[in-house]
Amino acid sequence: MNAENRPAATGLKTEIGLAVIATIVVLALHAVGGFETLVNFRGDNDSLMRLVQVRDLIGGQGWFDLNQDRMGPEGGFAMHWSRLVDGPIAAIIIAGSALTGSMAIAETAAQILWPALLFCLTLFFIVRVSRLFGGEPAVLPSVVIGAAALHFIGVYAPGALDHHNVQLMLSSASLCLLVEAPGIRPAALLSGACAALMLAVGMETAPYVAVIGLCVAGLFLFGGKGDAEIARNFGLGFAGVAALAFLVTVPASSWAVAQCDAFSVVQFAVAALAGLGLAAVASIEAASPTRARRLISLGLLGGAVGAVLLLVFPQCISDPYSMLDERLRKDWLDHVSEAKSLFTLIASEPGAVIARYTTPLIGLVWMAVSLRGRHWRRPDILVGAVLAAAFAVSVWQVRGSTFSIAFAVIPLSAWIATWRQRAEVSRSAWVSAKMIAVWLVSLNASWTGAAAAAAVALERNAPNAAEDPAAGYCERRQDYAALAQLPEAMVLAISNLGSPILAYSEHRSLSGPYHRNVEGYRLALDAHTGSPDEARTIIEHHQVGLVAVCPANTESGIYAKESPDGFLAMLLNGDAPDWLELVDTSANQPLRLYRVRARN
């Protein structure tokens, strides 16, 4: 960590080459495994729903029309995702279809190429920051543990079309460009642009955008003229791209509609005010000649941004899931894996705690110890702040660990680099052993393996353990083959099956794991936990033609436990009412299908 910032061109070709090689290696590993994630989505409902949304766009749905007609009650509901992610995926599919003449081949190519491209870009930015943070010796460790970490978190696997990989790439880019900003004039402008795109793609990254913005303001407050220029350019990039994203993704008819879970006038107003305000404070001589003046000016700007949120958009300060009633929160949200807190995981999934929180914690502790009593450089401040923010988010919701695991690679690479240098100097077997230990504890895969071993030990005596647990969870494409052969109909199923029903067939699904589909989820929940007569009333009222049951899926067990005498519990026990007819081709399959018989 004694390395100073180097010229921008230093090692650039090497870092690009290493990122490309690592990407090819990871793709080769997926190829050896037969690209399993393309046929077994492993519960990644969002990637399947993204594919459905892209298909709709290619099929002629309007750019501003995000309504998902095939999910929920009649008329569907409006999704809260950004077309900024749909666009490039659709472009790859259209180009692939033109070249191959096959839409299926083109979709498969997009499902492989899009995550691989984002993997390569994310790894490049992490390696680049690692060089600036820990010097040349940190490059090789950052490639190795960085590629392993990005592979582990799963958001770059073939088929991963969800927006989390885009967000992680943009956050890594924004951080990297901000670290590079003193030596590259347009870097701060581009960093602000990446921060705005993060916000436009999804609200999950709002904490990281806020921390990066606060770091820029803080460096400007305590820095000199160079930091003023960086603050100005960052602010202009942030406000400018936010305005462009608003025009590109929000129709004119909705410019005044406030949405807290998607990019709208709320996020645009905050970004424009914060970005232009920061640029103005950094540019106006009277506002920034002394630290006291800068502090007052930034304080007034912060107060203005806070006032806009509190007075104009107070609804967006509350819990983003506050619109859910207590029953939906208990039966759905509390069981969403990425929304669980650290404390919930400690009680329910201790192995996941080891795998997801160890390397970020080690990175934070090492930074705190190694920098104690020393002058913190620009890379130290930025990396430390972003990693601490990501870890704090992960304590609240485990989804934040996707970012903290990736950002932890930067200090851990520097830690490995220091021990590599010591081993080269001393040639001591003890020092070499310590270096190997540092490598091992810095690899997220080591902790993942330890967590898996612990899980096996705890579950060794579990009754009826399946040899292939995923085989019965209805997470494979082939599980929906029988459904795809049936005439199009509305399907009643648990929410976990909603996205694959849409992706693997032409059917509609009443339920799906999305907070905007509140009515559809509630109807499905009432049908599953109610009596057969209550279920039939809902089924007939909403013209449901098929009932799909997946006995091994965790969600089915939750409903059966809540209502042991309910409709779904009866179906799980093989006790179907006489107005349901088992589809023969689904017998003895993970996904059982029933036709709804019309009343005589």
Image: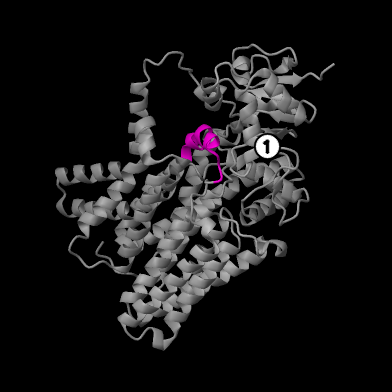
469 in relation to 195, above or below = above
Asked whether the viewer can see residue 443, the reply is no
Q: Residue at image x 58%, y 16%?
A: 565
Does residue 517 appear left or right of residue 217 in this picture? right
Residue at (20%, 50%) from the top-left corner?
Answer: 423
- Horizontal side of 550 relative to 468 (left or right) equals right
Seen from the viewer's position, the closer of residues 7 and 499 is: 499
First to last magenta residue range: 323-338
Name the quadrant containing residue 13.
Answer: bottom left
Residue 593 at x, y percent in the picture? 69, 20
What x and y, as percent, mark residue 462?
40, 16
In the rendered image, residue 89, in percent from the top left (x then y), is placed at 65, 51
Q: Which residue is mark 1?
A: 503
- For the residue pair 19 and 553, the one nearer the viewer reads as 553
Residue 578: in magenta span: no
176 w.r.t. 118: above or below: below
Q: Is residue 542 left or right of residue 134?
A: right
Please state which of residues 45 and 5 is positioned toward the viewer in this rendering.
45
Secondary structure at numbered mark 1: helix
Res 400 visible: yes
Tell me the chief SS of the magenta region: helix
Amino acid carrying mark 1 in the image: Ala
Going 39% across and 52% down the picture, which residue do you hit? 390
Query: Which of the image's four quarters has the N terminus?
Result: bottom left
Label 1: few (<14), some (14–19) or many (≥20) C-alpha neighbours in 10 Å: many
